[in-house]
Image (cartoon, grey):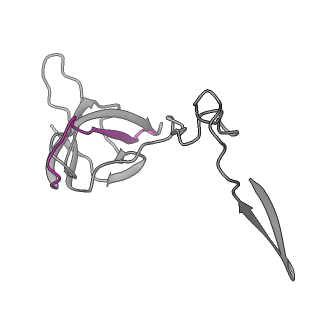
Amino acid sequence: MTFRTLIMPGVAFFMLSACAPAENSAEGGTAASPESGAPEGENTTDMTEPSSCAVVDSRNWHAWVDVMPGPDSAPRLHVSGEVDMPTPGYVFEWREGAADRSATPVQRLILEATPPDGMTAQVITPEQVKYEGPAIARMYRGIIVLCGGAVLADLPDVSITE
């Protein structure tokens, strides 16, 4: 690749011109990309970056803390909502994300959606999703539901069920 500079009064523009793609090596392999060392055309995306979320839309989110008394009872956080997926058959998993350290924290929950294997109908499919886990506090300032780095829901009203 080469850079060219085009100068106009008071402004410099840099243009990037691509060279012809490297020829395949004599052994029949593909040329390596100089930036990553990986063969050209191969996906070199960093896997630590958040992936995109397949959720098309979401609604009807609710969050509450269950503090019902009983033997061996401990406060439990519940979050539920409805998500629209591009096809049926997705499998959902929840992960607890970061929470601030205030007395009434905001908890982040991460929804991970794994697509189905094989061929499926291409039809928007509503799915109920529910989280239940230990509460880190009796009261919350809010719950933020994330998917692929995007906010699906910001729930400032977390009720308490006694």
Residue shown at 36% from the left, 46% from the top: 146
Q: Does residue 1 appear to the left or right of 143 in the view shown?
A: right
Q: Position of residue 97 (x, y in %)?
A: 41, 36
Q: Position of residue 103 (x, y in %)?
A: 42, 38
* Residue 99 in sight: yes
Position of residue 69 relative to residue 148, above or below, is above
Image quarter hosting the C terminus: top left
- Point out the stretch of residues depicted in magenta: 102-123
* Residue 143 in sight: no
Residue shown at 65% from the left, 39% from the top: 33
Instruction: List the single residue furthest toward the bottom.
Output: 9
Q: Position of residue 70 (x, y in %)?
A: 12, 22
> In the rendered image, which quarter is residue 92 located in?
top left
Q: Does residue 69 appear to the left or right of 25 in the view shown?
A: left
Magenta segment: does it hold 106?
yes
Residue shown at 15% from the left, 47% from the top: 127
> In the rendered image, which quarter is residue 88 located in?
top left
Position of residue 82 relative to residue 160, above or below, is below
Q: 66 or 60, which is in the foreground?
A: 60
Q: Position of residue 45 (x, y in %)?
A: 53, 40
Instruction: List the single residue furthest toward the front.
Output: 26
Magenta segment: does it hold 121?
yes
